[in-house]
Structure formats: structure tokens, C-alpha cells
Image (tube, rainbow, N blue to C red):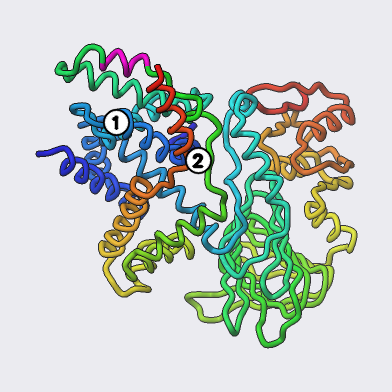
Amino acid sequence: MDRGEQVRWFAREILPHEADVRRWLTRRVRGLPDCHVDEIVQEAYARLWSAGADRIMNPRAYFFVTARHVVGEVLRRSRVVAIETIADIEALNIADGDIGPERRLSGREEVERMRHVLEQLPPKCRQAFELRKFEELSHRQIAERMQVSESTVEKHLVKALKFVLQHMKESAPDTRATVWKRHEQRRQEQ
Amino acid sequence: MNSVARNSEIEDTAAAWVLRLDRGDLSEDEQRELETWLEADTRHRGEFVRAQAMWVDLDRVAALHAGRAPLEPPAERSPHLRAASFAGAVLAAGVVLALSVNTYLSGRETTDVGEVRRITLDDGSAVALNTASLLQVQFRADERRVVLRRGEASFQVAHDVERPFVVQARDVSVRAVGTAFTVRVLESAVAVTVSEGVVEVVRDAEAEGASDKTRAGRNRVVVAAAEQPLAASPIEEKEVARRLSWEQGRLVFDGDRLDDAVEEVNRYSAVRVVIDDPALRGKSFVGVFRTGDARAFASAAAAAFEVPLREEDGALHLGD
């Protein structure tokens, strides 16, 4: 699999699960020292990348398990956490509901959500993005069309990309709320 | 530096590199700089992969956003993964869905290898998009323009004298009012086959200012090859129908050279057919196959010419 193919594989098989992994992590590492969700997610992406897409049979489960490993390692390094906490994380089975059949948004919902996100972009930034992605113009062509420099076009596009990445972090709908409630109840009962 | 500040710095840098790459190839210095940055911290690589994946994914969202029906990109994966993964089955279902009729105003349509899709444009014109093709629809008040970036598409143009229908492929424009024709982008030429009505084929000449122009009616094919004047030649009706058989998901060979037939079959198939015996290339071949069924084609050819067929490295080899 070449680089471009692997990136497309990530877009298709990993990205859609990031919101769920983040949600799981947030509940798991809250209050633990040196555990920052962004860092763990980045670390997990790097490991998934070097594992190689064609070796990963179940991307969603692999993503979850990798994130859990990273948490375990961070905790062991930090040395200030009680041994029980580490054991707790290590022993933590990811509940079926977390990995299990994902609930992706339907295509239509996804469009609506993205439309909403893109509408919030500043006008110039949005224009550059639409010319790039809808019209498939090159950066140079966009620069000519908008009568700005190429580096300004690049800045607009960087901004658009960061905006959607940030959006994925912050406002992913909590489709798993009920599953979580059940899971937490089970934990408390034990 | 606290972790939050450091993280936003990583995100900024990763996004900047993704767009630098999106602009075009990196200079050697930039390439080195990127490598150094990626090597400095695994988190850099992680965020870079994440941002790149999102940028690529936005292509799909952009296509959806343009009003297209929900559609997953078809999977490109190794055979063992396809067998093992439920997601693969879902994606395969997406490919089947892609054959249904979509209506939309403007946007971008692509097909993958082996895929054929029918599209109805908002003026009522019908388009069939053949395998591995990319089409952009840019309708305006005074002109209905579509750009065929790669592959092949056939058009049934709805009649509208006020708004000519123009198909652009490289430097060639095909202008029609109410007509049926097919445009195919080949490696070194653009071919226009007319099955109904009349079209005007124009080649833009940037430098000379004198553009080349020709009109072609029913059962004519116009070939615009590089560095050569436009040439229109007659073609049998049967041949026109045969050339359009992919619209019905069929490939029809009627005395074609085997190497031409193989090339055609390979356009639609991830599994390639290879002729190992040079003596087979010029043999004439007859048969009807479903597009994408390279295996059926290869076994028929092996049987017809009494040569062995073996599968090796994911390709079907004909002859010793």
C-alpha cells in the first residue's frame, strides 16, 4: 500500500472512530496525571501508521486497544500513580458497546453537519476551501481568482482544515451515551 | 511550555505541512525540513497523519456537500482484508448503490475501476459515467458545461437551444443542442463518437489563435490526437452500439484483436489479464462479458485458443 492509499485508508477506517475513542479516553483518563487526550490520540495515530493498514483487520478495535496501550505506558512512566490505578487501566476491558457496531452518521446527516461547520468559516476562508475542494482549482488558480497571493490561499486552507479538525474534537454527538450509562452502572455494581 | 500550548503548536505545524503538500511537490529543502520535524516526536507524525486523513476525507464531504447522494468511497484493500472485514461488505454495498440514479445540480462525479454510474443532470440530460472516470458539472444560465477530466462518459443531451451543452475534455470542446454522443479521454487523444444528432467539435488553439473545428453527425467518430488536425470518420451503427455496450454493463468483442480486448477488459477490473504468449496478441476474438469479470473473459480466451491459464501475483496469465 503506498502512502496515498494508506492516507485514504486512514480517512475511511480510522478517522470516523476518533470521536468515540476520544470520548472513551476522556472518561478513562480524567484526573490522571500526564494523560492528555490529544497526546494519546496523536501517539495512537503514529502507531497505527507504522503498524501498516494492511495488517489491521479490525481498525476500530485496533484504534481503541492502541489508545489503551498508550495510556498504560504513560501511567507507568509517571510513577506517581498508585499501582492499583495502572492495574485498573491494564485490566480494563473495553466494553463491547465501545468497540461494537459503530453508529456512523448517515451520509445525509454528515453533509448537514459539515455544511453547518463550513458555514461558520470566515467568508474568504470558505471561498478558498470551496474553490479547492468543489472546483478543484490549484492554489495558483485560487490565488488568481481571489486576487490574493498563493501564501494567503494556503493560510486560508490551513485555517479551514484546522477548523474541521477542531470541530471533530469538540462537537461529536454522543451516540454512545446510553451504552456508557450501562457500562458505568456495571462498574459501580462490581 | 504547558501541554495545551505545545499541542496547538503541533496541530498548526501539521496542518501547514498538509497544505504545503496539497499545493504541489515539496522542494528538497522542504522535504528535509518535513522529515526532520516528523522524526523529532512521534506525536508530530501522528498529528500529520490525522490532518492528512481529514484533508483527504473532505473530498468526500465536498462531493456530498455538492448535493450528491450519500456514497462511501469504494474500498481499495487487499483480498484477505476484504474477506475478513464487515466494513468491506458495507463498502461493497456502497458500490452497488452507486449504480442507482442520482439527480443533482452541480458538482463532481467519480467512478472507480469497474464501476459504471448513471447520472441525471438538472436539465434532464442523462450521463453514463464509465469506469475510472471523473466528471465535473458546471452549469450556468447561458451554458451547460461539463468537464470530463478522465475516463469516458456518454451523454443524452436534453434539447435546449438557449443553453448549449458543452463537454470539455482537455483542449477539446464538444458542443451540442440535443444529441447523444460519447467522449473518451485516451492517453494521447480524445475520441468523440456520435450516435444521434450533430455535434460541433472544437479544439482550442492557445497560441495561434486559429482553432480547429469540425461538425460530425450520426455514426461518426472524431479523433483529436495530439499535434494532428481533427479527423471525422464514418463508423458502422453496430460499432457505435458495441462501443456503448459498457452502459449495459457488458463488453462486446466481435473479431477484435485479443490484445485490444484484454486492454478493454483490464479497464474495468482490479485483477489484470496478461498475455504471456506474443503469438496470441493478434488473434481475433469474439465474446460478450460482464464488465469487471476478467476471470470469465480469461477462461473463455484460454479455451478458445487452447492455451493454459494461470493465476499469479493477482493477475491472470494467458499462454506459456
Residue A87 part of the magenta-drawn span: yes
How far is the residue under mark 2 from the one under mark 1? 20 Å
- The residue range painted magenta reads A85-91
Residue nearest the observer in this picture, A158 or A177: A177
Residue B274 pos. (x, y %) = 70, 31
Badge nearest the viewer, 2 or 1: 1
Q: Residue at x 73, y 73 (%)?
A: B124
Mark seen at residue A12: 2
Residue nearest the observer in this picture, A124 or B256: A124
- The chain carrying label 2 is A
Report which quarter residue A21 is drawn in: top left
Residue nearest the observer in this picture, A78 or B53: A78
Q: Secondary structure at mark 2?
A: helix
Q: Amino acid at mark 1?
A: Ile
Residue A136 pos. (x, y %) = 47, 61
Q: Earlier in the sequence, mark 2 or mark 1?
A: 2
Question: Can you name the residue that lies furthest to the bottom here?
Answer: B162
